[in-house]
């Protein structure tokens, strides 16, 4: 988000709404290495459900923005596309980035840093990690639902028309990704970057975990392991062959990550990644409430555990009480046939 000028802030805060206005959402479209983030496409779908205009915003380095704009302008549901390129936006830092009714983004690390700061500047609230929304055009109210207590309860939040701009982030697994249509093309407008000379933070480096497997956050199949895998070597030798045979991403419970079996980027759960693949295999995972919060929306859950009373079986569609070290090798052999 581009840093708002004081004059713009004053105009926004001074706006009055005698009657409900048609919704106009601004969607922060994130991208990496020239490709739009799939979670942002889900945020675009959510914004389209407001029933009004949808404007996209793309910011980044001069090398990446042009190619991203070419892809983004053909997205379904997008009315207008704003873009801004500057070397200082090559890696977005919330301290250097800042007339819509809604501002929308995926519930990503960047958005969780940027949107609350912008909302605070405008003295308005922000709603995070929403799973559904409904906009009342007559009153101007927008009603959201969002999970609380590790997904064990659903909170309904209503943002009234008295809030001039409603900020919210979207749980990507709750909305389908917006598609691309060659015939559709939104109007494209360039914005001048705002130079920040006294930024309090500086980007040093980015460390990415490289893998030939699908990305955990968007994979259609996920194979996850828990504490029962004993150590990192056993974790890899047991799970990786099965994941490769299925073309699946690899995940892990918090217990497995804390024990050093897997990298933190593979953690699934309340404090890790929230996934909802077509197939989720939980191997040696007991099913702590924090883990269930991150995977219970999966379409088909398969659990293997020696403990017949393991909580994972309460959400599993297919459960097998057995030793995973016997079951997994047999599944791999069957899949290779």
Image (cartoon, rainbow, N blue to C red):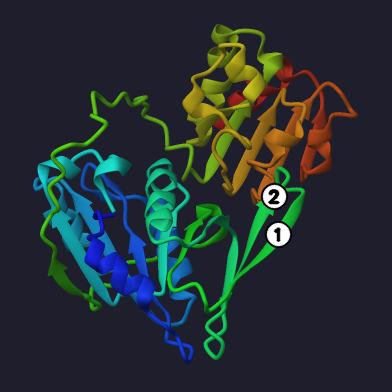
Q: Quadrant of the N terminus?
A: bottom left
**Residue situated in front as seen by the camera: 14 or 215:** 14
Q: Earlier in the sequence, mark 2 or mark 1?
A: 2
**Residue 118, horizontal then vertical, whole percent:** 37, 55
Q: In terms of depth relative to the viewer, which is nearer, 112 or 125? A: 125
The disc label shown at residue 9, or none: none
The answer to whether the residues at label 2 and label 1 have Cβ atoms under 8 Å apart is yes
Q: Percent from the top left, x then y, of residue 174?
A: 57, 58
Residue 208: give x, y in percent of width and height: 33, 26
Measure the alpha-carbon separation of dots 2 and 1: 6 Å
Determine the residue positioned at 25% across, 69% down: 74
Residue 73 visible in the displayed image? no
Q: Is residue 58 visible?
A: yes
Which residue is pictured at 56% across the width and 11% down the height?
Answer: 260
* Residue 8 in the figure: left or right of residue 139: left
Report the residue that reaches farthest toward the right: 309
Q: Which circle marks residue 155 in the picture? A: 1
* Looking at the image, residue 243 lies above or below residue 110: above
Q: Quickly name the residue at label 2.
A: 148
Is disc 1 surrounded by few (<14), some (14 to 19) or many (20+) residues within 10 Å? Answer: few
Q: Quadrant of the C terminus?
A: top right
State which quadrant residue 237 falls in: top right
Q: Secondary structure at mark 2?
A: strand
> Looking at the image, how many numbered discs can be counted on the residues?
2
């Amino acid at each position: 988000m581009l840093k708002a000028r004081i004059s713009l802030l004053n105009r926004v805060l001074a706006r009055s709404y005698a009657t409900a206005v048609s919704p106009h959402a601004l969607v922060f479209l994130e991208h990496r290495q020239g490709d739009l983030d799939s979670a942002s496409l889900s945020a675009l779908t959510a914004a389209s459900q407001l029933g009004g205009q949808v404007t996209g915003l793309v910011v980044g380095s001069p090398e990446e923005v042009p190619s991203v704009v070419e892809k983004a302008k053909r997205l379904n549901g997008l009315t207008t596309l704003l873009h801004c390129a500057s070397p200082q936006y090559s890696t977005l830092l919330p301290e250097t980035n800042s007339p819509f009714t809604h501002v929308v983004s995926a519930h990503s690390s960047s958005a969780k840093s940027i949107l609350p700061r912008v909302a605070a500047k405008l003295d308005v609230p922000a709603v995070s990690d929403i799973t559904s929304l409904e906009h009342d055009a007559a009153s101007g109210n927008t009603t959201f639902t969002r999970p609380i207590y590790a997904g064990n309860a659903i909170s309904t939040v209503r943002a009234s028309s008295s809030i001039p701009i409603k900020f919210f982030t979207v749980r990507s697994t709750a909305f389908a990704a917006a598609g691309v249509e060659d015939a559709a093309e939104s109007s494209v407008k360039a914005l001048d970057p705002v130079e920040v000379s006294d930024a309090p933070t500086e980007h040093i480096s980015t460390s990415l975990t490289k893998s030939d497997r699908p990305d955990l956050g968007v994979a259609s199949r996920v194979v996850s392991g828990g504490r029962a895998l004993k150590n990192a070597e056993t974790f890899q030798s047991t799970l990786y062959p099965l994941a490769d045979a299925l073309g699946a991403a690899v995940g892990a419970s918090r217990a497995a990550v804390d024990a050093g079996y897997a990298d933190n980027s593979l953690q699934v759960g309340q404090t890790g990644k929230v996934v909802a693949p077509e197939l989720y295999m939980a191997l040696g995972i007991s099913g702590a409430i924090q883990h269930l919060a991150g995977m219970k929306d999966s379409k088909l859950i398969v659990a293997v555990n020696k403990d017949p009373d393991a909580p994972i079986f309460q959400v599993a569609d297919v459960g097998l009480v057995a030793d995973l070290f016997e079951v997994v090798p047999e599944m791999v052999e069957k899949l290779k046939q």
